[in-house]
Image (cartoon, rainbow, N blue to C red):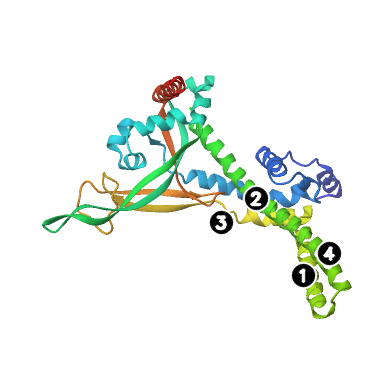
Amino acid sequence: MSLLSAVAEFLKPPPPPDPDLSKALGRVAELVDPMLRVAPGFERHLATPLRHALGYCDGLVAALPGPVDISRHAFATDPLVHALFATADDIDQMLGRSQAVRDFLAEPCSWEGEHFYAMFAARRQQKRQFGMARQGDVIRNDVPQTVLYFSGQTLIEPNCQLDNTLHGLRCKALESLLRTFHDHVDVLRHERDGLRADIAIERAHLTVLRGTSGGAAYQVATRHLAELDARLRQHAEALLPDHLLAALADYLLAPEPALHLSPVSVAVDRLGIVHDGPVDDASVSTLSFPELTARDRRLHLAMVARFSREEARTAVDRVRDQQHRFVLI
């Protein structure tokens, strides 16, 4: 390369930033700490970790099963949908009470198709009971059983276009990661403030000891105060923008502990009774689904589902009518 070409290459303006990366950097400052923007090399230090986190969120959403049809018909024909709800009416209640669905149906875009998509999430629950079961040629009614059921059914990012739903879920996945780190920063701040209060108390106590007893008690209090001071310095240093930036970069390069899917497989019959081991029974189905671990550390079954727009609209109207009747009574 000639000297002229080298100079021209050096003076060439930098390429425009990746729109997704620029948006992600803005979310970092918004959701984690606005002071991060003043840290030296904010964009340079976070560019690679954020690209990694964005790719991880893309893979996480792509790993969600579905779209799975959830409807009254599916409740009767799909073992997984049958296990997710106690009755078919519960599907209508979920749709009718979902604020996300209500907001979606109020938008003109809800008329773009006969169906819409959303992420379906629910918490897996189990309870123990005694029930009837065949043991050989004998039917017993005191057999211990485990019953599978689900609670907290929730819909996220409803949209007529599947691609729009998936894009929204990828954005929410990154947001979940950033909010988790923000929670970590809040804990550090809370501990720092607690240490400041402890130090103030210990200094007052030390003043009393200096004027009264001294001796061994004074030495113990002095060492304790030094330990508190050292811990306070550590917390204060960890909360400096450049240290937070380095910690966030490491966190985004290894997001798996904060947000991940775990495969689950369980064999249940139509009554929700769990069966262990091989079962020669047509009424028993093996359900396979992933469970999502996110900010609150609770496990949620997660999948992409498809719903009828008209069934959802009818469900919303029915629940609204039930609520009005309740208020009138």
- The circle drawn on residue 183 is 2
Q: CA distance from mark 3 to mark 2?
A: 15 Å
* Mark 1 Cα shell of 10 Å, populated few (<14), some (14-19), many (≥20): few
Q: Are marks 4 and 3 in contact (CB under 8 Å)?
A: no
Check disc 4 and report its element: helix, strand or loop.
helix
**Residue type marked 1:** Glu
Q: Is residue 135 visible?
A: yes
Residue 317 locus on image (x, y percent) = 43, 21
Which of disc 1 and disc 3 is earlier in sequence? 1
- Distance (Cα) linking label 3 and label 1: 31 Å
Judging depth in this view, the residue of 230 and 114 nearest the camera is 230
Going from N to C along the chain, the mark reached first, 3 or 2, is 2
Residue at label 1?
Answer: 227
Q: Amino acid at mark 4?
A: Ala
Q: Which residue is mark 3?
A: 257
In space, the residues marked 1 and 4 are separated at their CA atoms by: 16 Å
Nearer mark to the viewer, of 1 and 4: 4
- Residue corresponding to mark 4: 204
Amino acid type assigned to the residue bearing label 2 in the image: Asp
Q: Amino acid at mark 3?
A: Pro
What number of labels is visible? 4
- How crowded pointer 4 is (Cα within 10 Å; few <14, some 14-19, many 20+) is rated as few
Image side of residue 211 versus residue 141, left or right: right
Q: Position of residue 120 (x, y in %)?
A: 45, 39
Callouts 3 and 2 close, C-beta under 8 Å: no
Q: Earlier in the sequence, mark 4 or mark 3?
A: 4
Crowd around label 3: few <14 · some 14–19 · many ≥20 (10 Å): few
The label nearer to you, 2 versus 1, is 1
Q: At x 46% / y 32%, what residue is drawn?
A: 117
Q: Nearer the viewer, mark 3 or mark 2?
A: 2
